[in-house]
Amino acid sequence: MDMATAYEEALPAVPDWLNKGDNAWQMTASTLVALQSMPGLVILYGSIVKKKWAVNSAFMALYAFAAVLICWVLLCYRMAFGDELLPFWGKGAPALGQSYLIGRAGIPESTHYYSNGTVETPKNEPFYPMATLVYFQFTFAAITMILLAGSVLGRMNIKAWMAFVPLWLIFSYTVGAFSLWGGGFLYHWGVIDYSGGYVIHLSSGIAGFTAAYWVGPRLKGDRERFPPNNVLLMLAGAGLLWMGWSGFNGGAPYSANIDSSIAVLNTNVSAATSLLVWTTLDVIFFGKPSVIGAVQGMMTGLACITPGAGVVQSWAAIVMGICSGSIPWFTMMIVHKKSALLQKVDDTLGVLHTHAVAGLLGGLLTGLLAEPVLCDLILPVKNSRGAFYGSNGGIQFLKQIVAALFVIGWNLVSTTLILLAIRIFIPLRMPEDQLLIGDDAVHGEEAYALWGDGEKYDPSKHALHPSVYSEQTNPSQFFNGARGVTIQL
């Protein structure tokens, strides 16, 4: 039987360096991560907030997803994964040309050298085209931006948000990505951030908290009572987020290899453990399990395992899940309520706790629990290990601390400067009349076609064709059945 034409290596579309399995997995992983944002977080944000903010919250996530993609291919991908401009930043350039995108993927600054100048780990060159890598890394940038949005839901001026997204992507996200992943100084120093505990979760949590401070709080009534408008839909969004994390951590090795399998298993083990621990604490201290609490526990478990998913053993993933289900719970439920500073800053969805605290916790635990054999499967610096495995493990823990301080400091400063610059031209917070009304005032749209807020149905006012019903104002004699067009609410 003749080989199908599509599999002939001589075709220009099938160069000898292309591994179709790796390429297929990487595009699948990219799609899974993209689904976490769109529709995952769009649904989650639109349903976890008060009804009057459902459209605005979902739209902030939707806008960020689209805007990040265009900025990414125009400039930001190569700032994060291109040629070095500074030890923490790459040279910005478009990633749009055919000659660039169909060539073999590669991260030019990823070659790691020994102190004597000889190569320790060669340049990272996955077996698929650059187009696949550009899109995969975009999905991480997009979800970071959307996670940040969770801190400012319910009051940030949508025009200010539209300006903030590209600026923060350029001046904050690309710095962390290049420093830790793209061949920057923290990458070559040997800091472990397997799939974004620092680049994504710590940065989004710190930047979100900083943005919440500068934007200001929600209305007093919204802060005191902010119930989700649809708990079941919130769970659907959370489910997409959880399941998509297999692509999030499973795609980080850039191939369908042993390490990606370990990472997927560890990711789900940590998330499940954290969810159960958080729920147990809710039952012990509040007497009943909370669905919102379970979702938060799931998120902290996913964020915590991310920096070490492919370099820790599965029993360590359980340990990390226990820690992520309890320590962020404590900071959110106990410390937050007793801290004047934390009370002053209105972090709508508690992103500081669910992502910054959990991401920091994961990075530090990775510095303790990273297993040497697993580290050698993927890390550029050989013989890396956590402190619990002796040798140079104590140094690794110190590296994790220093990297966390860099990410925290950079995001505090860059986010502050960006928002202060935007504030000169656009108010960061919505005007009071929009804050009172919500979606209808901001977008001219509402999430649900339901009568509410005490409004009564008036056929002459609300019917599509009032004249048709003008003579049907008397109640029908059929009280136990349908009343036709005259509806009494």
Image (cartoon, rainbow, N blue to C red):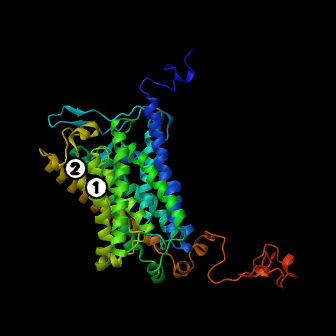
Q: Position of residue 171 (x, y in %)?
A: 37, 57
Which residue ends up furthest to the top in the rendered image? 1
Q: Position of residue 353 (x, y in %)?
A: 34, 66
The amino acid beneath tag 2 is Leu
User: Residue 320: which numbered mark, if any?
Assistant: 1
Q: Is residue 63 visible?
A: no
Residue 238 left/right relative to 210: right
Q: Position of residue 231 (x, y in %)?
A: 52, 67
User: Residue 369: which numbered mark, if any?
Assistant: 2
489 vs 198: above or below: below
What SS does tag 1 mark? helix
What SS does tag 2 mark? helix
The amino acid beneath tag 1 is Met
Q: Position of residue 177 (x, y in %)?
A: 34, 50
Q: Is residue 381 visible?
A: yes
154 vs 278: above or below: below
Residue 91 left/right relative to 403: right
Which residue ends up furthest to the front in the rendered image? 480
Name the residue located 84 percent from the left edge and 85 percent from the top edge: 474
Would you say the residues marked 2 and 1 are in contact, meaning their CB atoms lie under 8 Å apart?
A: yes
N-term mark: 2 or 1: 1
Name the residue located 45 percent from the left edge and 72 percent from the top edge: 428
469 vs 66: above or below: below
Give the Cα distance between marks 2 and 1.
9 Å
Along the line of sight, the residue nearer the viewer: 10 or 245: 245
Along the line of sight, the residue nearer the viewer: 290 or 115: 290
- Binning the other alpha carbons within 10 Å of mark 1 as few (below 14), some (14 to 19) or many (20 upward) gives many
